[in-house]
Amino acid sequence: MENRKYIELEEMILKELSALEDSLDSIKNTSKVVELDQQLIGRLSRMDSIQDKEMTKANIVRRIQKKSQLIEALKRLKEKDFGFCIDCGEEIDIRRIRINPAVRKCFSCMQK
C-alpha cells in the first residue's frame, strides 16, 4: 500500500476515534441514573426507563469495542502490518478498508 494511503487512513482513523470519544462523553453525560418514584409513574414507564437504560449500556459497549478495534488498527498501521488479510496474507481492497478500517480479513476469506 502506498505511503499516501497510510496517511489518509491514519487521519480517517484518528477522526473516527475523536468522534467516538465525543459521542461516548455525550452518552455518559446524558445517561445519568434517574431514580423513579414508584408511586408517581406507572409500570410501563418504569419498564421503558429500564429498557432505555439497557439500550444505552449496550450502545456504550459497542462504541468502546469499536474504539479498541480502531486503536488496534492504528497500531497495525504504524507497524506496516495494516491492510493485509490475517488468513491468506493478500492485500485487502482499499475500498473495504475505507468503509471499516478495523477490518482484518479480505472479502473472500471473510466469506469462508
Image: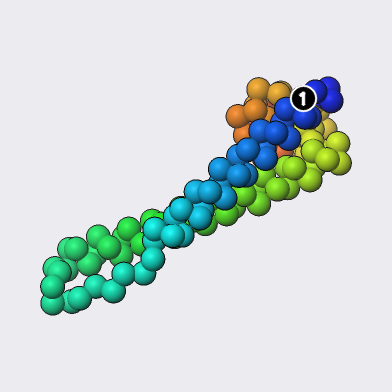
| Label 1 secondary element | helix
Viewer-side residue, 102 vs 78: 78
Q: Residue at x 60, y 39 (%)?
A: 16
| Quarter of the image where one finds residue 31 | bottom left
Q: Residue at x 19, y 63 (%)?
A: 45
Q: Residue at x 51, y 55 (%)?
A: 25
- Give the number of marks: 1
Q: Position of residue 83 (x, y in %)?
A: 77, 32
Q: Residue at x 27, y 63 (%)?
A: 49
Viewer-side residue, 110 vs 22: 22
Are there few (<14), some (14-19), or many (20+) residues within 10 Å of tag 1? few
- What amino acid does circle 1 point to? Lys
Q: Position of residue 66 (x, y in %)?
A: 59, 47
Image height of 6 relative to 47, above or below: above
Residue 88 visible, this angle: no
Q: How does the figure colour the protein chain or chains?
A: rainbow
Viewer-side residue, 64 vs 32: 32
Image height of 102 relative to 52, above or below: above
| Quarter of the image where one finds residue 77 | top right
Q: Is residue 49 left or right of residue 16?
A: left
The residue at the far right in this view is 79
Image height of 45 relative to 84, above or below: below
Q: Position of residue 87 (x, y in %)?
A: 77, 38
- In which quadrant of the rendered image does the N terminus lie? top right
Residue bearing the label numbered 1: 5
- In which quadrant of the rendered image does the C terminus lie? top right
Q: Position of residue 82 (x, y in %)?
A: 79, 36
